[in-house]
Amino acid sequence: MQARAVVAVEPYRIEVQNVEIPEMGADDVQVRVVHSWISNGTEGSFVRGERIAGDTPRSDTDPLPFPHVPGYQKVGVVEEVGANVRKVQPGDSVFVTVSRVAGMFFDFAGHISPSVSHQSQVWKLPSTLEPIVFSGMVLTQVGVNMGMRPTLEPGDAAVVIGDGMVGHWAAQTLQYRGAAVLMLGKHDDRLNRFERTQNDAVVNITRENPLDAIRAWRSDRIQVLADSVGSVAFVESLFPLMKRFSHLVSAGFHGHDGRIDIQKMRDFEMTLHAPAGWTAERMDSTLDLLTQEVITTTHLITHRFSVERAAEAFDLILSRRDGVLGVVLDWEE
């Protein structure tokens, strides 16, 4: 059986190809994909050849992971279900994480249609919102998980490092829980997409000293520091502003440079949370928050491309162009 897929054929090189996929099994769901949302950080890292698996950085002794089909999030319409599948039926609008593929470095795929996935990787979507709202739901779940992990009380100060998509969804979740949120970033166009209340703020660290800006924002100390970028040195520079019994949440990719000084954390009896990946329970919770429109997504989409222009889409991300945030591939006219 064949499918159309976005294939990373070598570092920095993307092609759209026909690929082989396994036949349907009894627990599988086949989906005609409508939209897939690129995860800029994770997929960019894989396409550059920096990772060998999940959050595992590639070492010089590891093989280069090519060719592979990057990605892990898409929405579409169910075309066929296996004999054991009861949760969805043909015609349902669904979200899908990873799908199966043959002949690639990894046996799983993201940007591929039709997609064949185990039913555990499929979620039925509500009819009240457009499916594109949910098309980045794994990445949305990472931000939600960051915002849900730490202990906080309404009114506590939370600082989010990073103005990317995960940073935005972490900030939205912390707002939902009652925190006052300050977002640190380097891009005015991204920072301005953060919908702030009177208690919230944004700081462009290319123009302002972050420690001075945080002190000017809040006279008390920080309860939550949520790092979506992955710079230990920057994180540790903010430790003097932390409360006792505060929380550090880190979802940034550090590669081989993720060593943090625990002794510095002990000075504040600080708890470290290191969320990664996704679980069914967290995906369910994220789906609920999206359905209630507590968490919003489409205002973060800056670019949409037909799947045939996937190489252009990835070039925007790999070159880290200004003005690029959410990038979605459209699989149908």
Image (spheres, rainbow, N blue to C red):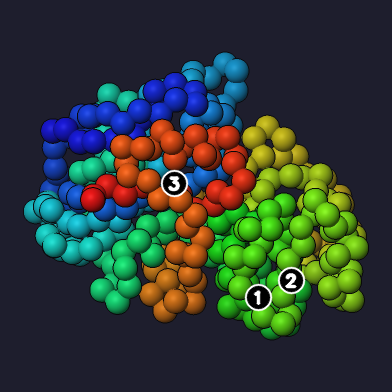
Picture layout, residue 101 above or below residue 73:
above
Task: Choose the circle earlier in sequence order: 3 or 1.
Answer: 3
Q: Find numbered disc 3 in the image and state the secondary structure of the residue it sits on.
A: strand
- Residue 198 picture quarter: bottom right
Picture layout, residue 150 above or below residue 103:
below
Mark 3 vs 1: CB contact within 8 A: no
Mark 3 vs mark 1, CA separation in Å = 26 Å
The answer to whether residue 284 is seen in the rendering is yes
Mark 2 vs 1: CB contact within 8 A: yes
Residue annotated with mark 2: 201
* Residue occupying the point 47% across, 57% down: 301
Residue annotated with mark 3: 38
The kind of residue tagged 1 is: Arg
Residue 190 horizontal/vertical position (percent): 62, 58
* Residue occupying the point 55% across, 43% down: 41
Q: How many dots with numbers?
A: 3
Residue 112 horizontal/vertical position (percent): 28, 40
